[in-house]
Amino acid sequence: MKILGIFLTFVFTVSCGPSVSQKKTRDKTREIIVRKTECYLVRGACKTSCNDWEYIYNYCNNEPCCVVREYKSPTSK
C-alpha cells in the first residue's frame, strides 16, 4: 500500500507540471525580451519603421530595431 501511495504521488506531481504551450509562450516572451535588450545595447529603438539615416539591426517582436548609421566625415586630399 505504501508503494502504491508513493507511485500515485509521483504520477500526480509529474502530470501537474507546466504544459507544453505554457513553455512555448514563456520561451517566446523571453526571446522578445532578449531581442529588445540587444536593440537597446546597440543604442537602437524599436519603431514601426526606420528613417533613411537608420538601418535595421534586428526585429523586436514585429517591429524593426532602428540604429542610427555611423557618420563618416568626407576625407579631403
Image: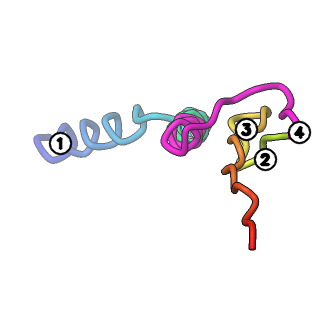
Q: Earlier in the sequence, mark 2 or mark 3?
A: 2
Three-letter code, disc 3: Cys
Three-letter code, disc 1: Ile
Mark 2: give few (<14), some (14-19) or many (20+) Cα within 10 Å. some
Residue found 72% across the figure and 65% down from its top = 75
> Which quadrant, please, contains the C terminus?
bottom right
How far apart, in angstroms, are the residues tagged by discs 3 and 4? 10 Å
Q: Which element is circle 2 on?
A: strand
Q: Is residue 69 above or below residue 5?
A: below
Query: In the rendering, which numbered label is found on residue 16?
Result: none
Q: Quadrant of residue 12?
A: top left
Q: Residue furthest left?
A: 2
Kindly check if marks 2 and 3 are in contact, taking CB atoms under 8 A apart as contact.
yes
* Residue bounds of the magenta highlight: 32-52
Which residue is label 4 attached to? Answer: 52
How far apart, in angstroms, are the residues tagged by discs 1 and 4? 66 Å
How far apart, in angstroms, are the residues tagged by discs 1 and 2? 59 Å
Kindly check if marks 3 and 1 are in contact, taking CB atoms under 8 A apart as contact.
no
Which residue is label 1 attached to? Answer: 6
Compare residues 21 and 63 and report the one nearer the observer: 63
Kindly check if marks 3 and 4 are in contact, taking CB atoms under 8 A apart as contact.
no
> Which quadrant, please, contains the N terminus?
top left
How far apart, in angstroms, are the residues tagged by discs 2 and 3? 6 Å
- Mark 3 or mark 4: which is in front? 4
- Mark 1 or mark 2: which is in front? 2
Which residue is label 3 attached to? Answer: 66
| Residue 8 x/y as whole percent | 28, 38
Three-letter code, disc 2: Tyr
